Image (tube, grey):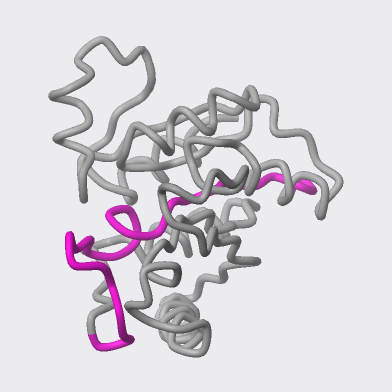
């Protein structure tokens, strides 16, 4: 098993169902088919999984930090039930107009993860469903991967010339990553 092999995942639309009305409670957090198994598969092959997510619902007052913690506790518990583990969760609490450096497509959260873990982001797999996920990955030299779940199909339709790997879902992306040497 290689040390410090990470895969960075967006949350909404990649691991769980997305909602234009935001995921505001644990009851609304519903895993996508195969996503929990995908995280376990990545772990089995020596990858550490980290979630990097914009959570502007905090800034919008749709939920508070305690509720977000409960949502993430449910996600962690359900991943563990499938034999997987999420090492860490990095989230941006700001709104789109806050001009922070941590809200994707800006790379602040990815840079913070790299600093905290003393790793290079160059070539690291970053899996997302929106253009801003891909742009944040590209900004730091990581390797973006698009999944068609969540906003992924729309992202692909609106950006047909993306020259990156595209998969139906997180499980297919995980199979691709774990098949590589």
Q: Which quarter of the rendering shows the C terminus?
A: top right
Residue at point 60%, 28% (across, down): 142
Compared across the picture, whether 114 is left or right of 20 comes to right
Q: How many marks?
A: 0
Q: Answer with left or right where residue 68 lies relative to residue 110.
A: left
- The residue under the point 62% across, 43% down is 101
Q: Where does the image place residue 116, in percent across and percent down from the top left?
A: 82, 54
Quadrant assignment, res 106: top right
* Residue 27 image point, x, y percent: 25, 88
Q: Residue at x 56, y 71 (%)?
A: 85
The relative height of residue 64 versus residue 43 in the rendered view (above or below) is below
Q: Is residue 107 magenta?
A: no
Image location of residue 48, percent across then percent down? 64, 56
Per the rendered image, the range of residues in magenta is 1-27
Q: Residue furthest right?
A: 118
Residue at 46% in and 28% down: 135
Q: Say if 92 sits above or below 81 in the image.
A: above
**13 relative to 72, above or below:** above
Residue 151 horizontal side relative to residue 65, left or right: left
* Place of residue 140 in the rendered image (x, y in percent of width and height, measured from the top left): 65, 27
**Most foreground residue, 99 or 46:** 99
Main SS of residues in magenta: loop
């Amino acid at each position: 098993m290689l040390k410090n092999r990470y895969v960075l995942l967006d949350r909404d639309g990649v691991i769980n169902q997305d909602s234009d009305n935001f995921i505001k409670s644990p009851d609304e957090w519903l895993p996508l088919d195969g996503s929990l198994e995908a995280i376990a598969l990545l772990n089995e092959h020596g990858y550490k999984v980290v979630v990097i997510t914009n959570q502007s619902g905090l800034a919008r007052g749709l939920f508070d930090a305690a509720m977000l913690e409960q949502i993430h506790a449910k996600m962690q518990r359900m991943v563990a039930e499938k034999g997987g583990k999420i090492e860490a969760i990095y989230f941006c609490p700001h709104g789109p107009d806050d001009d922070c450096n941590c809200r994707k497509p800006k790379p602040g959260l990815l840079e913070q993860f790299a600093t905290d873990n003393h790793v290079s982001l160059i070539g690291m797999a970053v899996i997302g469903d929106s253009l801003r996920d891909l742009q944040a990955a590209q900004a730091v030299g990581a390797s973006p991967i698009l999944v068609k779940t969540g906003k992924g199909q729309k992202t692909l339709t609106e950006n047909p010339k993306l020259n990156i790997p595209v998969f139906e879902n997180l499980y297919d992306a995980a199979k691709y990553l774990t098949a590589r040497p």
